[in-house]
Amino acid sequence: MAFAIPLIMLAGGAVAAYGSIKQAEAQQSAANYNAAMADQNARIALEQAGAQASLQRQRATQIQGSVMAGYSAAGVTSDGSPSDVLAMSVSNAALDEQNILYMGRLRSIGYVNEATLDRFSGRTAQEQGQLNAASSLLTSVGRATYGYSGMARGTPIRSRNESPLYEEY
């Protein structure tokens, strides 16, 4: 019966180590899932920006066409100020389109950075789980060895409260 106590200690350490590894695997899986979602969001941000830029370009082309039609209907020639106004309108439309694309790239970069951080977090969780598992095993081996050596010498295993090192004065 006395020999069973160190075995139970070892088994407890093995169970704790297994739990640490499984917890780390779950954390890594969650981090990898979050990274995949962030990668997907990065692609979506670029696609949305492209679609918004395309809509902006279409609207600008329609507005410019309406302005030209209005000039023609009013008998205004495209020389001088009307031409300058139209050129400025084209320039502003191109700037708006570039701003939309730039904002989409910024959102995408944010998601890519988030994915990188999630992957790093997953690797860290995995490493920490392995270290915790090793620590649990080593601690249980140490306790079991100490307990077994004490039993072999005939020294009873004491709890912390029964140890002479923790006596109260």
Image (cartoon, rainbow, N blue to C red):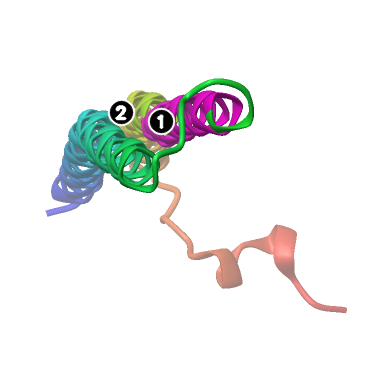
Which circle marks residue 109 in the picture?
A: none
Mark 1, other Cα within 10 Å: few <14 / some 14–19 / many ≥20: many
C-alpha distance separating marks 2 and 1: 44 Å
Asked whether the viewer can see residue 94, the reply is: yes
Asked whether the viewer can see residue 10, the reply is: no
In this figure, which residue is indicated by the disc labeled 1? 97
Position of residue 28 measured from the top left corner of the image (x, y, whole percent): 24, 35
Position of residue 147 measured from the top left corner of the image (x, y, whole percent): 37, 43
Residue drawn at 49 percent across, 65 percent down = 159
Which of 107 and 83 lies nearest the eye of the viewer? Answer: 83
Per the image, label 2 sits on a secondary structure element best described as helix
Tell me if label 2 and label 1 are in contact, CB under 8 Å: no
> Is 11 positioned to the left or the right of 124 in the image?
left
Per the image, label 1 sits on a secondary structure element best described as helix
What is the residue that sits farthest to the bottom in this orientation?
169
Indicate whether residue 101 is drawn in magenta: yes
Q: Earlier in the sequence, mark 2 or mark 1?
A: 1
Badge 1 amino acid: Glu
In this figure, which residue is indicated by the disc labeled 2? 126
Which of 8 and 59 lies nearest the eye of the viewer? Answer: 59
